[in-house]
């Protein structure tokens, strides 16, 4: 068992390269619960949280789950409902929807503040990566 008592550590480390697993584990140490998400989704949400913030990144995930037909509260909280739905979703469809939601969030930031346009290209690269 890992320090969270989930028993998923060996599976996690066999699927996620060491550098990326350290990123997700850093999120776990700060109490964000990324370890309860499918690995590739956890990495993407954490990456988005770097400059969108944790709550907004989770809201992107929750909106992406809606796009995949899974209704969860859109509250920015990474609870068991959101994590469970992420595990049930088709992972390819969820990643595509998450990327789209993130791109929309970045475009909204530029629309709200035109001086942010200088960051738009990089932000969209991050969203679609």
Image (cartoon, rainbow, N blue to C red):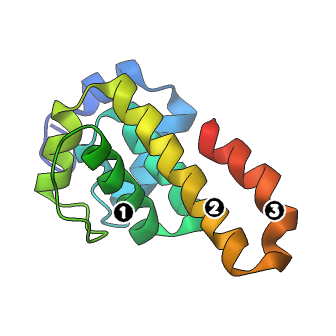
Give the mark nearest the N terminus, 2 or 3.
2
Element at label 1: helix
Residue drawn at (26%, 48%) of the image: 66
Element at label 3: helix
* Furthest residue in direction top, as rendered: 14
Disc 2 to disc 1, how far (Cα)? 13 Å
Give the mark nearest the N terminus, 3 or 1.
1
- Asked if one can make out residue 129 in the rendered structure from this viewpoint, the answer is yes
Q: Quadrant of the image for the N terminus?
A: top left
Residue 112 in the image, given as x and y percentages of width and height: 67, 79
Element at label 2: helix
Tell me, for residue 106, which label it has, or none: 2
Residue 120 in the image, given as x and y percentages of width and height: 78, 58
Residue drawn at (27%, 45%) of the image: 65
Q: Quadrant of the image for the C terminus?
A: top right
Q: Residues within 10 Å of mark 2 (few under 14, many from 20)?
A: many
């Amino acid at each position: 068992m890992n320090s969270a008592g989930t028993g998923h550590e060996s599976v996690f480390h066999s699927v996620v390269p060491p550098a990326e697993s350290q990123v997700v584990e850093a999120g776990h140490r700060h109490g964000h619960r990324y370890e309860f998400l499918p690995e590739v989704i956890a990495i993407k949400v954490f990456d988005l949280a770097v400059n969108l913030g944790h709550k907004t990144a989770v809201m992107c995930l929750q909106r992406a789950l809606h796009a995949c037909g899974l209704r969860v509260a859109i509250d920015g909280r990474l609870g068991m409902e959101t994590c469970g739905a992420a595990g049930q979703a088709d992972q390819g469809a969820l990643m595509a929807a998450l990327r789209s939601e993130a791109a929309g969030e970045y475009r909204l930031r530029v629309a709200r503040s035109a001086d942010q346009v200088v960051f738009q290209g990089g932000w969209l690269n991050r969203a679609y990566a």
